[in-house]
Image: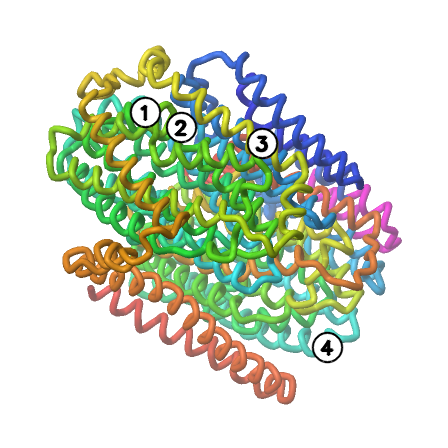
């Protein structure tokens, strides 16, 4: 039962702390300590599947299954490790005393939900965790409730996420019908033996759920709006939790998605998302939104790899992406704190604090994919696995060039100096340690986890997960591919450096711009996608607004009729009696038709 | 034994003392538990049928009244009278759940609902609500007696036994649905319910919504399952009414400004969910309905306890929930928990109940009903979350609101039950399953 302690300890301690301690500092330490203890306890968790019968009615039994395999442990340790760093970082970031209690409680609840998700062994546990993720992420995104844009963003998130939740529920019902079980192990091992059209519907619904959680086209807009949440929340949401839940489901239940028809859908969606998000990242001016678009891009790269069967490469990417992504969000938070601005062209001075500067540079280089950072291994791992498919390979190569271009652009803006603003420099210097050290720790990790590239296949093979996979996978580095990749990202980075930092090829910026944004093919494609996306997302918010308006109007109507009732209550009794009688008559008539039919 | 207890109770209640009343209720709970554990089954005094179904409901309603009494003790203007009236109503509830024929159902329903008119009248503001309830209840009585007459005319018996015969029987069924639909707050026979709920003091509302309406549903279950089980069309009609009821409740709840009125509509939508199990007409369905009755009773009474506290501070509107967390952390937590449970948050009884209901609908081939119910649950998220967000929004001048000790205890019981049986529901599922099994020999 060590696993239950690992998963639930932080939230339980957090709840006790909130109930008994008025002192916020104590709460903070308890939250951090609980996170650390949980993380340490992972070492003592024994592997295996724990099945607890939960409820049984009329011969049908539902179980709660907790599965601990290397794959589950990988995500669990990510959740707890990044969670711990996020907690430390937020102890410096969240200032207001009242907010801290709420923040820690919600954050710990979110962590517990994600940790439960990480060890789910059947659809029941997965669904419970998934619902709690939706709920807690809604609370966290709308955390700054007096900011109306935050409330709107939270509502939009909720609407899109609920589409996914409903789809998940539908797919669970279909799987229950098709397989007669909700255990992952049994479903995965019997996929090959079942062939029914219903199964496809179930898998498609599950895909919708995955796409909503992992922010794939056309559901990707919520992740950008979710930037309204506090920065530590964004860091957590984008690195190891929430958005990873979708991809992790796809990895965990890979055999369900291996059928050609399904994998080509994943392929198409991920390619579209990849292109949109990369282009958007290159033109975005909001500090956090650049990183947010890059998360979407990375999620689609993982799904692309999964659709091509390169699951192991996807898992490795999944693992290392967390570190540099959390790091870049932390840095964004620091810059936004110091300058008080949220746009790239108003931000500067990262170079003032050398430790943050170098750490962020590590993150940037890792995201771009430079040797020897982990991003290099994860990116070449995926592109090497795609090398047999030339058009896709070319596309991914172009994307990697653009990726290094936009992330160096981002970094150039932030690291520019500005003589006029000494106060901002002071802000950087006085940044609390609790915000700086997590950044440095993550920077070290972006290097350290490179080593896992060579050991991850061995690590995962113990849990039997790899035996489901149709092709016995291995991670390989194609030297030629690695060279091409490095050359491409170097070109991208150099171009970006010259354009945005040195400003030395200012003249060509326009032509570059034209090349990237307004080239006829790209432009045409982008226009179509933009129309669909904005149509979809406007549709949702429009629907939301209309719904609201309708209810408001209805509300006025009821209020007015309420006054009416108070004025003439005798009349309303007549009306009630009339409705009662009419109800009976309508029932008679409809019953008559039912009998005839 | 139960009868004995009842006579004693009615005599002793005249002392009107809170403590004695509670002791008697506790004794009743204890004796019902004993009966349940002994597995005794039979008919007492030709009126009470003791069986797993009725003992489960005995236990449920007595515990419900126990909690309502505690709330009323803190917030009622004249507790003594309320206690007597409520005990009469409880006797009616016993009669319904242990009924042997449609006549005892009729008697029990009247005994359960008429005292409530007086209970509402105890508060000065309640005259209008009481009058409305009384007039509509008399119409329902008329329809119910008409239904019984038709049934007797066609079958020559009052017994609760399966009958499929002349077409006219079906009309008796429809009249039963209408009359019991009033008691169970089924659309369109429920239009006055929100007025009554809003006009009554909160503890009476808790009893009305948590127990009286549930008695109506219990009666509906008995009549439909025991008499009309072979008439498939009736159950299709129930399914349609279930959809109408939950949709009406949820959609209208969305626009309510008054918290109690919103919760009144939400309890109507819950009645719609509970009807899913009746529409499924299987043992699993009835068990699921009973589970949801159990879940909603405790949630609703708990919510009304908190509303009673808020009403005393003149905070009736949803907007006035703002800042509740700063004023009374415990009340805000409990109310949010109850609402989340009604949404169907996993690991609470509300989730288990809904889940069982949807499962039973799917197993009975009513997948469409389950889909509509799920869509309805999504609608309900919006108004519950609005209230929850309001409670956790900060307000500048928040003075702490004191909660009575007794009330705090009652709410605590509801919270514990909602969580404990949400995490480990098997004991209750066993109970409702054997209770439903009695109707399906």
- Tell whether label 3 touches label 4 (CB within 8 Å): no
Q: Which residue is mark 1?
A: A377
In percent of width and height, residue A128 lies at: 47, 37
Crowdedness near tag 4: few (<14), some (14–19) or many (≥20) residues, C-alpha within 10 Å: some
- Tell whether label 1 touches label 4 (CB within 8 Å): no
Give the chain of mark 3.
A
Whether residue A145 can be seen here: yes
Q: Which residue is mark 4?
A: B127
| Marking on residue A438 | 3
Query: In the image, which is nearer the foreground, mark 2 or mark 1?
Result: 1
- A171 up-or-down from B310: above or below: above
In percent of width and height, residue B333 lies at: 68, 48
Quarter of the image with the C terminus of chain A in it = bottom left
Q: Quadrant of residue A438?
A: top right
Task: Identify the residue at horizontal 29%, vertical 52% (top origin).
Answer: A279
Q: Which colour style is shown?
A: rainbow
- Tell whether label 1 touches label 3 (CB within 8 Å): no
- How far, Cα to Cα, is label 2 from label 1? 9 Å
Task: Identify the residue at horizontal 76%, vertical 48% (top origin).
Answer: B7
């Amino acid at each position: 039962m060590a696993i239950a302690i690992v998963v639930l300890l932080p939230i339980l301690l957090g709840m006790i702390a909130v109930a008994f301690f008025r002192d916020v500092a104590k709460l903070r330490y308890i939250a951090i300590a609980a996170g650390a203890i949980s993380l340490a306890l992972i070492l003592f968790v024994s592997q295996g599947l724990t099945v607890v019968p939960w409820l049984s009615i009329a011969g049908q039994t539902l179980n709660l299954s907790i599965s601990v395999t290397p794959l589950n442990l990988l995500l669990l340790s990510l959740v707890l490790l990044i969670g711990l760093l996020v907690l430390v970082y937020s102890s410096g970031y969240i200032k207001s005393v009242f907010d801290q209690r709420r923040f820690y409680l919600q954050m710990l609840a979110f962590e517990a939900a994600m940790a439960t998700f990480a060890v789910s062994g059947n659809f029941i546990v997965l669904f419970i965790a998934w619902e709690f993720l939706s709920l807690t992420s809604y609370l966290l995104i709308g955390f700054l409730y007096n900011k109306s844009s935050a409330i709107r963003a939270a509502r939009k998130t909720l609407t899109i996420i609920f589409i996914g939740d409903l789809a998940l529920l539908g797919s669970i019902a279909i799987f229950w019908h098709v397989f007669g079980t909700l255990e992952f192990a049994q479903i995965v091992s019997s996929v090959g033996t079942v062939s029914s059209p219903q199964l496809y519907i179930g898998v498609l619904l599950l895909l919708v759920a995955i796409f909503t959680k992992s922010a794939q086209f056309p559901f990707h807009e919520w992740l950008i709006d979710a930037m309204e949440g506090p920065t530590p929340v964004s860091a957590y949401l984008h690195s190891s939790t929430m958005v990873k839940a979708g991809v992790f489901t796809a990895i965990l239940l890979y055999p369900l998605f291996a059928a050609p028809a399904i994998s080509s859908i994943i392929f198409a969606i991920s390619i579209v998302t990849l292109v949109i998000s990369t282009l958007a990242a290159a033109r975005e001016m909001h500090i956090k939104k650049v990183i947010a678009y890059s998360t979407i891009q990375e999620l689609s790269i993982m799904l692309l790899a999964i659709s091509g069967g390169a699951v192991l490469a996807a898992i490795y990417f999944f693992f290392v992406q967390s570190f540099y992504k959390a790091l870049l969000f932390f840095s964004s938070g620091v810059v936004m704190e110091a300058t008080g601005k949220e746009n790239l062209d108003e931000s500067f001075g990262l170079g003032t604090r050398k430790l943050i500067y170098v750490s962020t540079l590590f993150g940037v280089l890792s995201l771009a994919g430079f040797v020897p950072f982990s991003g290099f291994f994860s990116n070449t791992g995926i592109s090497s696995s795609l090398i047999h498919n030339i058009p896709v390979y070319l596309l991914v190569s172009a994307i990697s060039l653009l990726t290094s271009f936009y992330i160096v652009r981002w970094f150039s803006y932030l690291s520019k100096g500005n003589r006029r603003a000494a106060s901002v420099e002071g802000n950087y210097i006085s940044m609390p340690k609790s915000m700086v050290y997590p950044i440095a720790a993550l920077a070290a990790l972006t290097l350290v986890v490179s080593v896992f590239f060579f050991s991850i296949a061995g690590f995962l093979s113990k849990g039997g997960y790899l035996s489901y996979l149709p092709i016995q996978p291995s991670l390989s580095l194609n030297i030629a591919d690695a060279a091409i990749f490095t050359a491409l990202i170097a070109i991208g980075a150099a171009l970006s450096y010259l354009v945005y930092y040195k400003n030395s090829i200012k003249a060509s910026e326009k032509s570059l711009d034209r090349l990237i944004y307004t080239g006829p093919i790209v432009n045409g494609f982008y226009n179509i996608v933009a129309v669909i996306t904005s149509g979809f997302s406007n549709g949702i918010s429009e629907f939301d607004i209309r719904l609201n308006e309708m209810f408001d109007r209805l509300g006025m109507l009821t209020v007015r009729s309420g006054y009416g009732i108070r004025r003439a209550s005798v009349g309303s009794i007549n009306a009630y009696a009339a409705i009662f009688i009419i109800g009976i008559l309508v029932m008679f008539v409809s019953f008559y038709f039912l009998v005839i039919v | 034994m139960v009868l004995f207890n009842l006579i004693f109770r009615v005599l002793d209640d005249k002392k009107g003392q809170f403590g004695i009343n509670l002791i008697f209720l506790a004794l009743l709970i204890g004796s019902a538990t004993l009966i349940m554990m002994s597995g005794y089954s039979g008919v007492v005094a030709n009126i009470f049928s003791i069986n797993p179904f009725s003992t489960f409901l005995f236990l449920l309603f007595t515990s419900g009244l126990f909690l309502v009494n505690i709330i009323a003790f803190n917030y009622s203007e004249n507790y003594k009278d309320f206690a007597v009236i409520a005990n009469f109503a409880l006797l009616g509830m016993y009669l319904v759940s242990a009924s042997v024929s449609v006549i005892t159902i009729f008697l029990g329903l009247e005994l359960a609902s008429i005292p409530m008119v007086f209970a509402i009248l105890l508060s000065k503001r309640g005259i209008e609500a009481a009058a409305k309830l009384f007039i509509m209840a008399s119409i329902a009585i008329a329809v119910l007696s008409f239904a019984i007459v038709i049934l007797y005319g066609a079958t020559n018996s009052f017994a609760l036994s399966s009958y499929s015969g002349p077409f006219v029987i079906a009309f008796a069924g429809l009249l039963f649905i209408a009359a019991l639909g009033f008691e169970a707050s089924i659309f369109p026979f429920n239009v006055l319910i929100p007025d009554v709920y809003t006009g009554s003091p909160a503890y009476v509302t808790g009893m009305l919504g948590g127990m009286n309406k549930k008695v109506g549903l219990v009666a509906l279950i008995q009549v439909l399952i025991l008499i009309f089980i072979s008439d498939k069309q009736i159950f299709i009609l129930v399914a349609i009414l279930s959809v109408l009821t939950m949709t009406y409740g949820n959609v209208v709840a969305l626009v309510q400004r008054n918290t109690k009125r919103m919760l009144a509509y939400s309890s109507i939508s819950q009645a719609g969910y509970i009807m899913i199990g009746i529409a499924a007409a299987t043992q699993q369905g009835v068990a699921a309905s009973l589970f949801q009755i159990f879940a909603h009773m405790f949630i609703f009474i708990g919510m009304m306890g908190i509303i009673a506290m808020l009403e005393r501070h003149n905070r009736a509107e949803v907007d006035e929930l703002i800042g509740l967390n700063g004023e009374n952390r415990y009340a805000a937590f409990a109310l949010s928990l109850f609402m989340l449970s009604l949404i169907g948050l996993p690991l609470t009884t509300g989730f288990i109940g809904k889940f069982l209901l949807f499962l039973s609908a799917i197993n009975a081939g009513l997948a469409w009903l389950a889909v509509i119910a799920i869509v309805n649950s999504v609608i309900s998220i919006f108004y519950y979350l609005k209230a929850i967000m309001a409670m956790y929004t900060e307000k500048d001048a928040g003075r702490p609101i004191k909660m009575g000790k007794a009330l705090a205890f009652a709410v605590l019981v509801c919270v514990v039950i909602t969580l404990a049986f949400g995490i480990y529901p098997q004991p209750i599922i066993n109970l409702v399953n054997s209770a439903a099994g009695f109707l399906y020999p």
